């Protein structure tokens, strides 16, 4: 297959590239200085494709924002992508916070708890482990590498049931620990920190610190940690998002609605519509969903600078 | 998209149940049948002593019942854990039972799922507590579902005698008569869809609960259960009656392909594009909260019949409160279940819109004369009570109905989306169920 198809593609590519080049390269030869990296050829196809992808990603968000302004009646009787006559956003928000004795607030606080302890802890462990793996040599390092890489490949969902059985033996199910402790493990975060630490901390700097008499702990906190800041933020964002959105693990571990995170709580509200005699509250489910993503969006916007520099680290040889 | 994700989640939830279910049977060694009778004074003494009872139930009216019960017995605390229903509820329950920890003292279990738990000794027999003496209080359908010989595995909480709800506005608009037989129903479906191609007589994308209820009414008895001996056979006259009729609706695309209980479904019930709904008598409460904008449009009517003039009916949905074997505070738990499902709690629950399973309450004039504002002042309970009295009692579900229902869409469901005929779909459902039953150690034919 590939042996026959690849010449065709190269041929068509090579045919199209000069064709595009001949028209545009002529003026470029005359005034070469005008060609700056900032000015690129515009491609209609790429613009359209990007536009489509933009639409694809933004439309659900727009739908969510618009739908959050509607009452139950409005949701049933109007198009999803435009407002209906009833603007009920404020009413929906206050209902979301007060429905069932304000359990939404409890769920929000639970989620924050899981994120602060779970994602925070996972990040801390990833920094410590990543730094150690990057900068120290010890027997079995290759084995650790293999284990970490392998762990990245195992989806958390697959481990949820075994974890449940283990935790129930320890009597930890239906407690917040059942969500927090598994969240502390982030193989991907560890791997990312490992790679980042390898690039971001020059060995010479550590040696200098050691020669100046700093102990390992002090070297880590005062020399390494500041250098790891962009990577830390990146890992923190990853683990935060993962913990914030986690659904299956709490679904299996928790039964008591008082310990639900937002994901489970909203799902429970949504399920009320499928229950005999249940209260149908799609408007609150939608408003609740909107409120649930607001903190994530805020986190991304606030941490954007660090996050971007984190992504680019190590990509260019200095 | 939606449907596949939902199914995927269900699949995952189910897988976890199965994974855990493997260890479930070994969990409870103490055989509940060995227990001697518990006298009423034992129960009274327990109520005086007090304690906490944990209840896993999503039934919304239980909140008030629990509050009343605690007022009556101040030393007892009812810890009502709700918010989850359906598959997720059973996943959690099976998980807890197999883990042997965190098992509730009382669990809400739907009729179709009861035998699954009772057969693996997951539920206590309530007969020693006096539940066997309550048989005559309940309508035959629900009682048959909770009892097995002289054992009683739960007390019926509510019931779902079938009725047909129809959008009167739509039928009036096109001057179409409300069907009383299934033949008339098919005719009405054609007329409605012809008058307005957006209007369907019903939605049906393949729903195990609906199909089994329809088979029940048509006189088909596909499942026979005798301990671990199970017979599964959809090849009878009743099943043929149902598939012949329903196949016409599918072939002519007269049923809307919307899944029940989705937001689309609520929308369709509200805007007149789904004209009838044949389901359990608990539906009015869902109409009121889920389809508020169609208040006054809908009415209730008896379920269409296979033979004109008949009054055959069936059950759809409904659940019981049962006592998991591993639960604690058995006397207290039983006292609450009795209070909620047989005693004063029944009246409270009716007041909040639940549909009872007890004969006395169904026949009470206050109940029958209740005017439903949503149905334009109709006394709908008369129809429902009539239906409840006409449910054939000899129906049984599989001891693994939950699994069977989960594969319904992969077998019978094909009839709705491909050239597969309904009757062939039932056949492959039968084969898949038999295969699974054998794997689980049942003797299946």
Image (cartoon, rainbow, N blue to C red):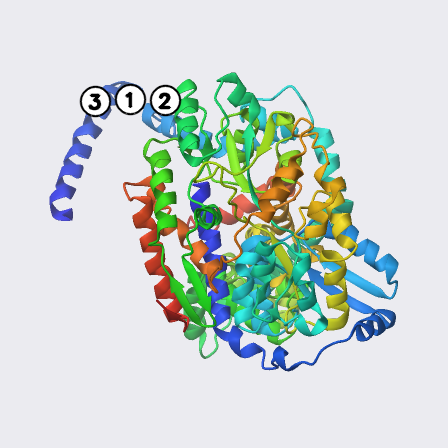
* Image mark 3: chain: A
Pointer 2: residues within 10 angstroms few (<14), some, or many (20+)?
few
Res B48 seen here: yes
In terms of sequence position, does the residue under pointer 2 or pointer 3 come before the other? Answer: 3
Cβ–Cβ under 8 Å for marks 1 and 2: yes
Name the residue beneath numbered marker 3.
Answer: A22
In the drawing, does residue B339 fall left or right of residue B175? right
Which quadrant holds residue B96? bottom right
- Point out which mark residue B131 bears: none
2 and 3 marks on the same chain: yes
The Cα atoms of the two marked residues, 1 and 2, are separated by: 8 Å
- Residue A52 locus on image (x, y percent): 40, 29
Disc 2 is placed on an element classified as: helix
In the drawing, does residue B90 fall left or right of residue B18? right
The Cα atoms of the two marked residues, 2 and 3, are separated by: 17 Å
Res A148 seen here: no
Name the residue beneath numbered marker 2.
Answer: A34
- Point out which mark residue A28 bears: 1
Residue under the image location 74 percent in, 57 percent down: B340
């Amino acid at each position: 297959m590939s042996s026959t198809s690849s010449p065709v593609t190269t041929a068509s590519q090579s045919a199209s590239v000069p064709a595009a080049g001949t028209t545009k390269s002529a003026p470029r030869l005359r005034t070469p200085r005008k060609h700056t990296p900032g000015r690129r050829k515009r491609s209609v196809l790429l613009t359209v494709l990007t536009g489509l992808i933009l639409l694809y990603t933004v439309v659900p968000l727009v739908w969510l924002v618009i739908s959050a302004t509607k009452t139950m009646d409005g949701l049933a009787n109007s198009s999803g992508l435009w407002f209906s006559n009833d603007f009920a956003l404020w009413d929906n928000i206050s209902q979301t916070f007060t429905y069932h004795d304000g359990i939404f607030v409890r769920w929000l606080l639970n989620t924050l708890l899981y994120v602060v302890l779970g994602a925070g802890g996972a990040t801390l462990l990833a920094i410590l482990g990543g730094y150690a793996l990057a900068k120290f040599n010890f027997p079995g390092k290759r084995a650790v590498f293999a284990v970490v890489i392998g762990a990245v490949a195992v989806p958390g969902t697959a481990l949820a049931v075994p974890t449940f059985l283990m935790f129930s033996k320890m009597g930890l199910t239906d407690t917040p620990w059942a969500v927090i402790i598994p969240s502390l493990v982030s193989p991907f975060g560890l791997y990312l920190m490992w790679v980042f630490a390898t690039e971001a901390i020059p060995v010479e700097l550590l040696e200098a610190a050691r020669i100046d008499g700093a102990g390992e702990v002090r070297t880590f906190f005062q020399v390494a940690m500041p250098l790891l800041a962009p990577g830390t933020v990146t890992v923190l964002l990853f683990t935060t998002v993962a913990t914030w959105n986690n659904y299956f693990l709490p679904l299996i571990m928790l039964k008591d609605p008082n310990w639900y995170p937002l994901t489970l709580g909203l799902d429970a509200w949504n399920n009320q519509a499928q229950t005999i005699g249940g209260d149908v509250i799609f408007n609150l489910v939608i408003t609740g969903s909107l409120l649930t993503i607001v903190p994530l969006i805020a986190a991304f916007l606030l941490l954007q600078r660090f996050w971007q520099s984190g992504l680019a680290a190590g990509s260019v040889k200095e | 998209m939606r449907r596949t994700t939902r199914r995927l989640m269900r699949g995952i939830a189910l897988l976890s149940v199965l994974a855990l279910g493997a260890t479930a049977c070994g969990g409870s060694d103490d055989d509940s049948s060995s227990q001697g009778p518990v006298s009423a004074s034992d129960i009274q003494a327990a109520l005086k002593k007090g304690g906490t009872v944990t209840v896993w139930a999503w039934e919304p009216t239980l909140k008030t019942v629990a509050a009343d019960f605690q007022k009556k017995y101040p030393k007892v605390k009812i810890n009502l854990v709700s918010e989850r229903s359906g598959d997720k509820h059973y996943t959690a329950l099976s998980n807890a039972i197999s883990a042997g920890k965190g098992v509730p003292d009382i669990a809400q279990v739907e009729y179709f799922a009861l035998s699954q738990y009772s057969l693996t000794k997951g539920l206590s027999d309530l007969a020693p507590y006096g539940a066997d003496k309550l048989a005559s209080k309940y309508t035959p359908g629900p009682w048959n579902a909770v009892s097995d010989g002289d054992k009683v595995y739960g007390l019926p909480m509510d019931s779902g005698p079938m009725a047909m709800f129809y959008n009167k506005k739509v039928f009036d608009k096109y001057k179409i008569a409300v069907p009383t037989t299934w033949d008339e129903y098919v005719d009405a479906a054609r007329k409605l869809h012809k008058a307005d191609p957006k209007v369907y007589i019903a939605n049906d994308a393949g729903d195990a609960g609906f199909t089994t209820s329809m088979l029940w009414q048509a006189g088909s008895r596909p499942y026979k259960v005798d301990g671990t001996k199970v017979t599964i056979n959809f090849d009878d006259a009743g099943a043929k009656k149902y598939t012949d009729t329903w196949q016409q609706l599918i072939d002519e695309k007269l049923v809307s392909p919307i899944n029940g209980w989705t937001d689309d479904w609520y929308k369709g019930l509200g805007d007149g594009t789904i004209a009838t709904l044949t389901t359990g008598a608990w539906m009015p409460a869902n109409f009121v909260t889920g389809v508020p904008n169609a208040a006054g449009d809908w009415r209730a009517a008896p379920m269409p019949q296979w033979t004109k003039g008949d009054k055959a009916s069936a059950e759809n949905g409904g659940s019981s409160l049962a006592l998991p074997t591993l639960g604690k505070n058995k006397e207290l738990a039983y006292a609450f279940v009795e209070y909620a499902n047989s005693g004063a709690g029944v009246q409270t629950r009716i007041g909040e819109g639940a549909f009872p399973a007890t004969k006395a309450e169904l026949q009470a004039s206050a109940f029958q004369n209740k005017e439903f504002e949503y149905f334009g002042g109709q006394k709908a309970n008369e129809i429902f009570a009539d239906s409840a009295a006409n449910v054939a009692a000899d129906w049984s579900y599989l001891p693994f109905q939950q699994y069977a229902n989960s594969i319904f869409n992969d077998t019978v469901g094909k009839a709705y989306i491909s050239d597969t005929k309904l009757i062939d779909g039932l056949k492959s459902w039968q084969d898949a169920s038999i295969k699974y039953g054998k794997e689980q150690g049942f003797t299946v034919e």
